[in-house]
Image: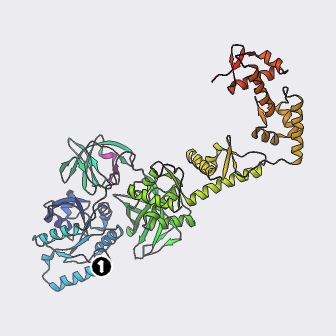
Amino acid sequence: MYVIGTAGHVDHGKSTLITALTGINPDRLKEEKERQMTIDLGFAWFTLPSGEEIGIVDVPGHRDFIENMLAGVGGIDAVLFVVAADEGIMPQSREHLDILKLLGIKLGLIVLTKTDLIEDNEWLNLVETDIRKLVKNSFLEEAPIVKVSAVKKVGLKELSNSIDTLLKQSVPKKDFHKPRLPIDRIFSLKGFGTVVTGTLLDGSFKVGDQVEVLPFGIKSRIRGIQNHKKNQQIAKPGNRTAINLVGVEVNQLQRGGVVCLPNQLQSTYRIDVEIKLLENNSAKIKHDDRLKIFIGSSHSMARARVIEQKEINSGETGWLQLEFEKEVIVKNNDRFIIRRPSPATTIGGGCVINAHPVGRHKRFSRNVIDQYKSLSSGSIKDMIFARLSDLKISTLSQLMEKSETEEELTVLTVEQLIQTGQIVLFEGENGLKAASWIVTKNNWLDLSEKLMKIIGDYHKKHPLKEGIRNEDVPNLIGVSRKKGFLIIEKMKLEGIIRSSGAYLMLDDHQVVFSTDQLDRILQLEGVFSESPYLTPSVNECIEIVGEEVYYALISQGKIIEVTRNVVFDRNDLDQIIQETRSLLGNDHEISAGEFRDHFNTTRKYAIALLEYLDKNEITERIGDFRVLKTS
C-alpha cells in the first residue's frame, strides 16, 4: 500500500481535488470547513485503476500553517504538486517545492487545478512555462502536468492513471523489524479510548503487541489497528495506520511522539547531520545559532554546532551537531527541515548521519571531520567503519543496531574490513558472530598505544615494581571492565605486554637493581641464612633494603609474606614445606608444639607457618593436630 501527499499554495484546490478523487473531504475541523482552508493535516484514500488502494495526506498551504504541513510529508511515496491555473506559481508553491527537495522526495506529478476557470490557452501555456521553469533541476523536472477541474470532474481519470503509473516506480518499503509510528494525530473514540495515527516506518505492528510511546516513556498495548477505517490484524511499513492504545489518555501524548516496540528505540538530545541550505538571503547558519528542526512529525528547537567551518552560507552544504532543547526520537538517514524561528522561514534541510553520537565533538578535529566524511559518503563500507570508529569497541550486534543496515550486508562488509586489516577482531577462533567484539585498526592502535604508554610511564616512575594492576586498566584507558580485559588479552596475545599474577608489564620490562641495592639484598639474605626459622620482621627487612626493594623482592617471589608480619625466604619456605611433607608421610600427624620444636622456632612462627600450609592446602587441621591434605 502506498501513501501520497499534496503540496502547493493555499487555496489552489488541494482539498477539493482530493474530495473529487476519493469522495472523502479531508478537511475534518469545523474551522477548516468554514474558512475553506486546510489548517491541519487531512487524510483520505481511494482505489487506483490497477486495484491498488492508496492513502492521501492533505497538507495545509498557508504559510501560517506550514509547520503542520511538515508533519505530514514524511514517509510519503510520491507527491501531487498542485498549482491553480488562475494564479500560477505563488510563494508557498516555491517553499513547498524547496521542502520536498530537501526531504529527498523522488516521485511526483504536477497537477494544474481549476482549469475550468481559464478559457485563454495562452495563459495556460504561460502558467505551464512558469511551472517548468520552477521545477527545473528538481525531481519534478520530467514529471507530467495533468490538467484537472475538480468541480467539473474533468481530468480525474487521467490523474488516477498517472498516479498508478507513477507508483509502479516506487521502491517497496523495507521491513527492518523495528516498527515506529511518528504520531501526527491523536484523538479519542467513545468505547475505545485513545487512537493515534501516522505513517508506519521500518517494520510491522500487530494487534496485541506491547509497545511504548517515546519520549514520554508510556507503556501500552495495541488493542486495535485500522487502515482506511478497516480493521486489520497487522500494520505493514509504509501504511497510513491508526492504532488504538490501551490505558493511555489523550492528554498524555503529543504530536511528534513515536510508537515503537519496547527497548528498540531511544531518545536523544544530540545528533550529527549533513545539511543543505537554500539559496536565499536568510539561509545562513553560524555556530551556536538557534534553529527550529522538523523531523518526522515533531519539531524542536536546537543549537547548531558548525563542524569544520565557522559558518555555512546560502546554497552551501555542511555538517552540524545539533543539540536539542527537548528529546527527539530519530534514526540514521532520517531527513529533516530547518526553519528560522523568527521570522519563520525555511532555510534548509538535511539527513541524520549519526542519531546517537557518543558526545560533543571538537569542531575542527581532523578525526571528527574524517568521520563526518565517511558517514556522509553513502558507502556502506565507509558508514560502517565510521559507526564503529564512534563506538570505539563494539560487538557485531551493537554495530548492526547502530548502523541500521541489513544484517547480511553488515556481516559481509565487516568480514571484508577484517580481511583488509581495517577492523580488528578480538575473538576470532570461531569466526565472526553477533557477540564477537571488534574495533577499528586506528582505535585499536590508539587504545593499545595508550596502555603501553601508561605502563611504560609506570615503569620509569617505579623501576623496581613489576607493573600496573590488571583491574586498574579499564579506568586508566577509559573503557568498561569487559573492554579493558579484552584489550589486555589481545595485547598479551600479540606479545606487547605480559602479566605476572595480578600485574601487567611491558614484555621487555625487567627489574634491575643498582649496585648499592644488590649489596643490601645480600645483607638481607645473610640475615635469613643465619636464622631461617626465626626470620626478620617486615619492618626489619625494609630497614635493611628499603621499601621499594623489599616490595620488588616480594613481587619476584624471592620473599614470601606468610602473614602481614611474618616473612620467609622463598628457598627456606620451600625447604620447610618439603620437610613437613616428610614428617607427615604415612598418615602421621603433628601438633603445633611438635612443629615448633622440630624447626627450633617460636610459637608465633610455628602458628604462622601452619596456617599458611593450611591455606595452601598442604596440610589440614584436625582438632589440635595437622595431617597432610588429601585430594
Rendered location of residue 488, percent (x, y): 61, 48
Name above or below for residue 512 compared with residue 44: above
> Front-most of 470 and 512?
512
User: Which contiguous range is marked in magenta?
Assistant: 250-263
Give the amino acid at mark 1. Answer: Leu
Q: Is residue 25 visible?
A: no
> Front-most of 46 and 370?
370
Left or right side of 13 for 278: right
> Front-most of 558 and 438?
558
Q: Residue at x 75, y 22 (%)?
A: 582
Outermost residue toward the top in this view: 623
Q: Secondary structure at mark 1?
A: helix
CA neighbours of label 1 inside 10 A, class few (<14), some (14 to 19), many (20+): some
Rendered location of residue 90, percent (x, y): 27, 76
Left or right side of 620 for 423: left
Left or right side of 50 for 57: right
Q: Is residue 195 magenta?
A: no
Label 1 sits on residue: 134
Q: Residue at x 14, y 84 (%)?
A: 120
Rendered location of residue 25, percent (x, y): 16, 60
Name above or below for residue 74 compared with residue 556: below
Name above or below for residue 45 compared with residue 626: below
> Front-most of 476 and 288?
476
Q: Is residue 53 visible?
A: yes
Outermost residue toward the left in this view: 152
Q: Residue at x 70, y 25 (%)?
A: 618
Among the 4 quarters of the image, the one containing residue 365: bottom right
Image quadrant holding the C terminus, namely top right
Outermost residue toward the front in this view: 586
